[in-house]
């Protein structure tokens, strides 16, 4: 399913790098203080334009990607087991009703919420990546596309 990869890569391309490229840069945050951060979804003051662009790109493109993901799941119903179909539906729900909601909460605000951004970046690295990998692996197994050692 290319759309599942599209979503994952889209978030990694447009949102994650903004902060990773500015690691250990002081940044003004709410309250006027400075904060040193390695968080994804962040930028320093001089990098705020990239954050704004990332927000805009996500907002403009995410539903096209998610719509394609939904269409691929619907088409897959004819070629995979009901269990595999349900697992893909579950992944879609996870992305739409959990991950996208969290990303949208963060990017709808003009002022960056550093704490929420850091939490989501950590969750993306530890949890979301694994769910995507597991879903692709399960689908490959279902379709007998895995090479057994």
Image (cartoon, rainbow, N blue to C red):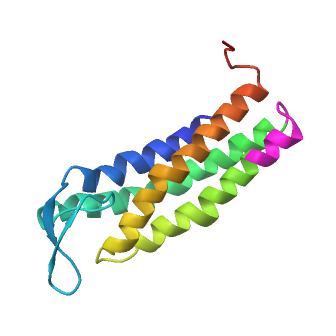
Q: What is the quadrant of the C terminus in the image? A: top right
Q: What is the quadrant of the N terminus in the image? A: top right
Q: Residue furthest top?
A: 149
* Magenta range: 78-87
**64 relative to 91 in the view: left or right:** left
**137 relative to 26 in the view: left or right:** right
Q: Is the magenta stretch mostly helix, strand or loop?
A: helix
Q: x, y (%) of residue 82?
A: 88, 41
Q: Residue furthest right?
A: 82
**148 relative to 29 in the view: left or right:** right
Q: In which quarter of the image is residue 31?
A: bottom left
The answer to whether 93 is drawn above or below residue 143 in the figure is below
Q: x, y (%) of residue 55?
A: 35, 62
Q: Which residue is drawn at 17% across and 60% down?
A: 47
Q: x, y (%) of residue 23?
A: 19, 54
Depth order, front residue of 28/48:
28
The answer to whether 28 is drawn above or below residue 38 in the figure is below
Depth order, front residue of 61/16:
16
Q: Quadrant of residue 22?
A: bottom left
Q: Which residue lies furthest to the front in this view?
A: 149
Task: Judge whether residue 34 is colored magenta.
Answer: no
Q: How many labels does the image show?
A: 0
Q: x, y (%) of residue 112?
A: 30, 73
The answer to whether 141 is drawn above or below residue 76 in the figure is above
Q: Residue at x 26, y 51 (%)?
A: 20
Q: In which quarter of the image is residue 33?
A: bottom left
Q: Residue at x 60, y 57 (%)?
A: 95
């Amino acid at each position: 399913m290319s759309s599942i990869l599209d979503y994952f890569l889209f978030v990694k391309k447009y949102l994650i790098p903004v902060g990773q490229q500015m690691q250990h840069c002081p940044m003004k945050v709410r309250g006027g203080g400075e904060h040193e951060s390695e968080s994804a979804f962040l930028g320093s003051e001089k990098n705020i334009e990239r954050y704004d662009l990332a927000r805009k790109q996500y907002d403009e493109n995410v539903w096209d990607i998610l719509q394609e993901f939904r269409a691929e799941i619907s088409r897959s119903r004819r070629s995979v087991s009901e269990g595999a179909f349900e697992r893909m539906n579950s992944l879609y729900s996870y992305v739409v009703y959990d991950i996208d909601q969290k990303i949208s909460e963060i990017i709808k605000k003009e002022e960056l919420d550093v704490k929420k951004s850091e939490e989501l970046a950590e969750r993306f690295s530890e949890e979301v990546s694994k769910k995507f990998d597991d879903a692709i692996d399960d689908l490959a197994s279902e379709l007998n596309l895995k090479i057994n050692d």
